[in-house]
Image: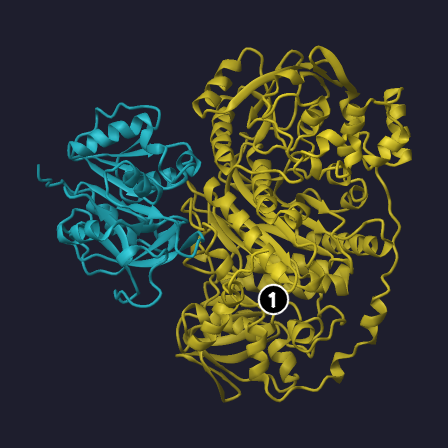
Amino acid sequence: MEVTVETAKQLGLTEEEFNQIKDILGRTPNFTELSMYSVMWSEHCSYKNSIALLKTLPREGGKLLVKAGEENAGLVDIGDGWACVFKIESHNHPSAIEPFQGAATGVGGIHRDIFTMGARPIASLNSLRFGKPEDTKTQHLIRGIVHGIGYYGNCFGVPTIGGEVYFDACYSTNPLVNAMSVGIVRVGKTVSATSYGEGNPVFIVGSDTGKDGIGGASFASANIDEDSAQDLPAVQVGDPFQEKKLLEACMEIVETSALIGMQDMGAAGITCSCSEMSAKGEHGMRIDLGKVPTRQPGMKAWEMLLSESQERMLIVVKKGREQEVLKVFEKWDLNCVQIGEVTGEQRLKYYLDGKLEADVPAESLVLGGGAPVYHRETKVPAYFEKIKQVDADKIQVPKDLKTIAEKIISQPDIASKRWIYTQYDSMVGTGNAGYNALSDAQIALVKGTKKALLMTTDCNGRYVQANPYKGTMIAVAEAARNIVCSGGQPLAITNCLNFGNPYNPEVYYQFSEAIKGMGDACRRFDTPVTGGNVSFYNQSPDGPVFPTPVIGMVGLLDNLNLHTTLGFRQAGDNIYLIGQSRNDINCSTYLYKILGEKYSPAPHFDLEEEFSLQKMISILIQAGILQSAHDISDGGLFTTLLESAMVNEVGFNIQANKDIRKDAFLFGEAQSRVVVSVREGDCAEFERLLGGMVYERLGEVVEENIIIDNENWGNIVDWKEKYDTVLENLMEKEEVVS
Amino acid sequence: MKFGVVIFPGSNCDRDMMDALRHDLGQEVIPLWHKDKDIDSFRTEDCIVLPGGFSYGDYLRCGAIARFSPMMQSVIDFANKGGKVLGICNGFQILCESGLLPGVLLRNENRQFVCKNIHLISDNDTTLLTKDITGKVLRIPVAHGEGRYYADNETLDNLYKNKQILFHYCNEYGEQKGKINPNGSLRNIAGICNRRKNVFGMMPHPERATSIALGNTDGRLILQGLMQRAEVPA
């Protein structure tokens, strides 16, 4: 087959990129080689449209042991000889097409990123975005995606302990599925994704290689190779049982210290692992593709090189120690087949049936090497004008605020996600210390120590849409606030940047502003970015999704006794609001979803104010004076109070601040506020500790009713029933067979 | 006495069970690999646990392949000699598949996996596992997709007649009222034993409720029962 610039374009490369490949090779690439470049230089693998900006983020400092980008995921010191590894990744497009397998393989992929480093995953979280909840199509996606996440995680045996779910019409066609895995490893026991040492054997381990996943990459158009393309399933198929065995086998081979390096196979399969490991170790590889265990006979070289079959790893073993490794994989009944060896020249040579199929410099394929880097054009989005025209202050305060409160807590964004999370095994591993002790961040014990990790994912895309810079700072700040309110210290973040088409200058403006905001906030909280994932092209016919830079943050809880929960404990405790109440309903659930105003500025946020608030919360928790702490976020103060009250089914009696519009007081989403409860006897000491901090005493915890300005809003049990059943009522209607 | 915990490929509650028995209950535990079959060091006062998880990927049917593993042949012999065997969740499914316990575990009534705290109660004063905790409401987590206990009416009647029901699902007050049953099991059955009362199976996970750090120690009360010497009728 003759390769021309047309072939390159069909594979998603530009003419300029095609010429660059010819320059690198000093000749025209053959089809197999061109295919390799097309996937390695795709947005997904090369980050070509984002890397220049990502490099502006703080990527070292804090407790980071390994800088972002040096390994599959950053390594964070948690003391006692332990480190923590975590990462978040998107599987949006596969999940849009095939929600069950798309979400399942997203979970499998992110766990492999963690255990390929020698770390054992101890918890996972997920951040999901769907279209309108009442749409049949949305419900089909929810069912499939939730089932897929549960199917994979439950069998794999890592608890799904938290996450977030938002609904907005902008995500109807293109839902977001971001999965995060958190693992722990002994310092010094990590495995690197590298390859070196001429003559060292290269093994492929795990599942057989099939044709799955190829269609999901650059090969969507059928005229590349019509006969084979017809058979290609577009989405990979996951097998959590294989992955569970692979995990245990990998944990055992790490102990042998017979490894040079290991890398999981995700996007771009064998091509990606061979080139990234070789480039890092500054060596080459000679691979005989005929030795790769395949699921079907007659696979072509490019098919094997690009296959995204799941549950596979590439490992490079110290020569002479092969038997130790083979024994482990035999024990777990997994493939472990030598497919080649490390060479001294820094080239990758792939053979099939004795014929040289591809011969390329490893470095030229990878990010940081030969892969292209682009700076895209930006333009201030036109919709910003609409935001400027809105003046929320002109909106009349409604008379019946109780009805509004009921509507807010009945929004699926706000209401209980019980229908979803009961389908996930959240307690396997016996480390989820938050199931019976709810806090703003999720908590996973580090067994063998007295410590725990706190973790959370956060992003309100509506705020980022309104103001990408501020909205992204808010996402980082809220993540940190959740960890601080739970008693911990923020350590580092991972990010999953879900945006529209980067070639749209308005989208790229959102992206560049978001990166700026993230950088500023991360520097302030001393939470470097350990790594993450960029997902562009999240679009629907109506335009891009809200810019959604999801922040996954991990923090450390040194002492379990400091774990602070969000539920009010007993009647008689005093309820305080720490932080400033504001006349601000901008961008709130109340304004956007109840009043229907789609354009308004992001809510109030000031980085320094936030930082002082979090310092103060830490001081109060260290002093052991808080009965509960819960931050104010989506839905505003009322939702926060209700959530605190529902845990132990108590009520609250509060007075509104007369200087503030009552709707803004109860439902506004101005940032940097936390609701705490304090025992009567501790109040004097509490107020002394607060010093010059802005705060107000709201009222007290009572037996069972919600009372606001002496008006009884009803029994907590009834509110809880309403809050708990919103999603169930939506989802448990008769399923429409589509 | 000592405990053995069988590790099948796909077991994922094996470590949890070992941690609970060792660290929270101070017991000696020996891991048993599914491909081995030597359990000669186990005496009938000892106990072998089949942990939860997805043995052999739950392919075919939950527990259907595990029963043919070499280790299970030894466990079946051990049980037939009167040795104590406890199956939790997937372990319960394996016990039913291997014929050590009657009945089957079907897919949950609502066709969804379910993970949450539920309440259990026992009125059975004839088994080691339950005799010291009758009438006490226990809060224990469940996590399964196929936990709906099913047997024909005659089998069920016999289970009651022979006092083989270990636990029923209940509400926090111990009543079998309201939405208490997480999977639709017949007669709210959560766990049963064999007629000889040395083989125990239950869907809920007591090993997930033995630690103060997790805020629940009700599971200790169940596992403690196994630490007593069995008085098994021949």
Task: From the viewer's perspective, tell me whether residue A267 is left or right of residue A225.
Answer: left
Establish if A607 lies above or below A516. Answer: below
Task: Measuring from the top left, give residue A511's x and y in whole percent.
Answer: 78, 53
Looking at the image, can residue A368 be seen?
Answer: no
Q: Which chain is cyan?
A: B
Task: From the viewer's perspective, tell me whether residue A76 is left or right of residue A168.
Answer: left
Q: Quadrant of the C terminus of chain A?
A: bottom right
Where residue A634 sits, quadrant-wise, is bottom right
Judging depth in this view, the residue of A539 and B32 nearest the camera is A539
For label 1, the SS is loop
Q: How many marks?
A: 1
Task: Measuring from the top left, give residue B98's x and y in whole percent.
Answer: 28, 36
What's under tag 1, amino acid-wise? Glu
Q: Quadrant of the N terminus of chain A?
A: top right
Establish if A633 lies above or below A311. Answer: below
Q: Which chain is yellow?
A: A
Task: Measuring from the top left, give residue A520's x and y in whole percent.
Answer: 74, 54
- Residue that appears at 60% across and 23% down: A294
